[in-house]
Amino acid sequence: MSMRGLKAAVPAALVAALLAGCASSSHSSSQRTSAPAVSSSGAASSVSGPIAAAQTTFTKYSAMPAPATLAPLPSAPPQGLSVISIGTPSPALEPLVQGVKDAAAVLKWKADAITASATSPAALGSALQSAIQRKPKVIMLFSAFPLSLFDRELKQAKADGIYVVSFGGYDYPIGGSSPVQANANGQGVTALNGKLLVDTLVSLAGHAPNAVFVNDFAVPIWFSITKAYKQEMAAVGGRYHQLAVNLADTGTKIPQEIVSYLQAHPDTQYVVLSLDAFSTGLYQALAAAGLSNKVKVISQAGTGPAIDQIRSGQLTATVAIETAYESWRMMYAATRLVTGADMSCNECTELGQSQLIVTKNNLSLVKGNINNFPFDTSPYLTAWHLG
């Protein structure tokens, strides 16, 4: 395994339009509850051009997406199989692992998890080796590192008859003869998140405001998000500003780095976080610096605390992702593999993604955990012949 010093990353993503041919898209406007586009003042928008287009997208993704429509498997999945989830230490990993456990419980599979000892390729590779030695039927590999770093381990898993479904897979073939048979949250589907961050920003402000994009730009999983963010910012006539941070500094150095940037750039109106976890300690730091009422914060992949933060006004909006249910989609792919179902249909190997833009205006849509929309497991139960 090479490039062991590559920077770490956590997942930022999830999934809702699985399997065209095996599942229909949940992103069509007819499948979302409509609502008027609004500005930060709550007034209906009357602008035209790129800003209006951004507001249309904002409105669409502020409505609850429809649950996936999944094609039934040829037979019910066998019981008693084992699945092991592997990832690096991060709160963002927890709902993904829990989703695997919840789906496994329904299937009567045994689910275990191995958390790497550190956020590094070497530590994740070691965890993957440990999982392979336990010989599960399926491995769920949550990694934002290039999968090519783990080629030796992945080939060993295939030789041992272990199916691997990845999350955030990058720089590695998926499906066919590859050791990795399906992937969620890939580059092809996460780009939309970057666009949605800008469309949210523009819709709430009513124009393209002065905003700084905070990201660890060395993390492969965010390459497409960054590219899409830049493209959409240019499309709406805004200027792109960025602040590079290190993911490993989450909750420690990042809050002060953001404060220092804001003090050096006092005309900044919005802080846009590529990952909601970057807000750990941020609101306290903003308050201490007297900046709480001078800037607004928008994030991607809001987790549990985001609900209260939006309600209190600390967080203006988050582009939430269907974290728990993305795990169910990964498990759906796994059940297709173990039952010998066709994996050649569109998105059977590259799984889709679902988002919900959450603000104070639609906070009532979120029930319990912000990551658990659209709150319906029945399509999976039906596809598995269990409902």
Image (cartoon, rainbow, N blue to C red):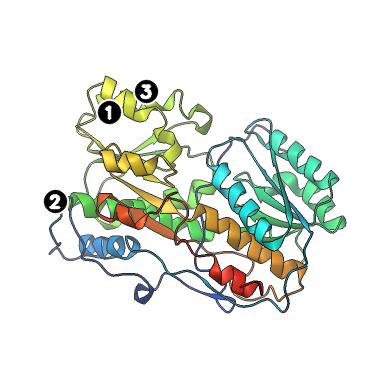
The reply to whether dot 2 and dot 1 touch (C-beta < 8 Å) is no
Of badges 3 and 1, nearer the viewer stands 3
Of the residues shown, which amino acid type is indicated by label 1? Leu
Is disc 3 placed on a helix, strand or loop?
helix
* Up-down relation of residue 131 to residue 247 (above or below): below
Q: Position of residue 178 (x, y in %)?
A: 75, 61
Residue named by callout 2 = 41
Residue named by callout 3 = 256
Label whose residue precedes the other's in the sequence (2 or 1): 2
Q: CA distance from mark 3 to mark 1?
A: 10 Å
Can I make out residue 175 in this image? no
Of the residues shown, which amino acid type is indicated by label 2? Ser
Q: Name which quarter of the figure residue 340 lies in.
A: bottom right
Residue named by callout 1 = 262
Q: Position of residue 359 (x, y in %)?
A: 29, 50
* Up-down relation of residue 278 to residue 197 (above or below): above
Q: Position of residue 2 (x, y in %)?
A: 73, 38
Q: Residue at x 62, y 44 (%)?
A: 145
Which image quarter is the C terminus in? bottom right
